[in-house]
Image (cartoon, rainbow, N blue to C red):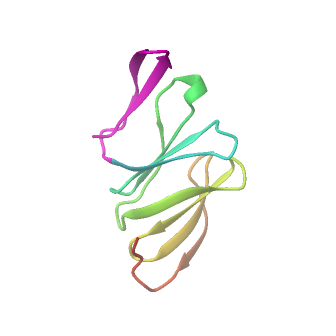
Amino acid sequence: EGILFFYQIEGLQYEMKIYADILQPISSILFSPDYTVLLLVTDQGTLYTYKPAHSGEAVKLLDTCRSCFLAADFLTGNKYCVSVTISGEVQVWLLKDGTGLSKLNLNVQVQV
């Protein structure tokens, strides 16, 4: 549904909070290596970043509808991420503003 929930658990009690609603189904969630940033990936071609410690809104990093993302992950630290599309396009992005740094087309359809 595109909603990021946070559960605070203490003993047998818990509290649920809605942290972000990105209005698109989330296909995967990844923590950065230092656990300060979440990368939210949708199957509709959108990447979001979210900083749990700041409790703000998820920030749209990029939106590419020409080919749906199959997977994304962080590259060393919190500066870059890499994504692969179903059509076989591998891209490296700058997390700060979504700038594309490099692209490689594998010329094959990628599967899980």
Extreme residue toward the bottom, this view? 107
Give the position of the N terminus as an image quadrant. Answer: top left
Q: Position of residue 76 (x, y in %)?
A: 72, 55
| Occupied quadrant, residue 37 | top right
Extreme residue toward the left, this view? 1
The residue depicted at 64 percent of the width and 38 percent of the height is 35
Instruction: Depth check: give the residue in front, 62 or 47.
Output: 47
Give the position of the C terminus as an image quadrant. Answer: bottom left
Q: Position of residue 48 (x, y in %)?
A: 47, 44
| Occupied quadrant, residue 85 | bottom left
Q: Position of residue 58 (x, y in %)?
A: 47, 35
Magenta-colored stretch includes residue 3: yes
Q: Is residue 23 above or below residue 98?
A: above
Kindly report the secondary structure that dominates the magenta region of the rendered protein. strand
Q: Is residue 105 above or below residue 53?
A: below
In the image: residue 26, left or right of residue 77: left
Magenta-colored stretch includes residue 83: no
The residue depicted at 56 percent of the width and 52 percent of the height is 98
Q: Is residue 12 above or below residue 69?
A: above
Q: Position of residue 30 (x, y in %)?
A: 53, 48
Instruction: Depth check: give the residue in front, 22 or 38.
Output: 38
Task: Magenta stretch: give its range.
Answer: 1-25
The residue depicted at 68 percent of the width and 47 percent of the height is 33
How many marks can you see? Answer: 0
The residue depicted at 42 percent of the width and 77 percent of the height is 110
Instruction: Depth check: give the residue in front, 80 or 32.
Output: 32
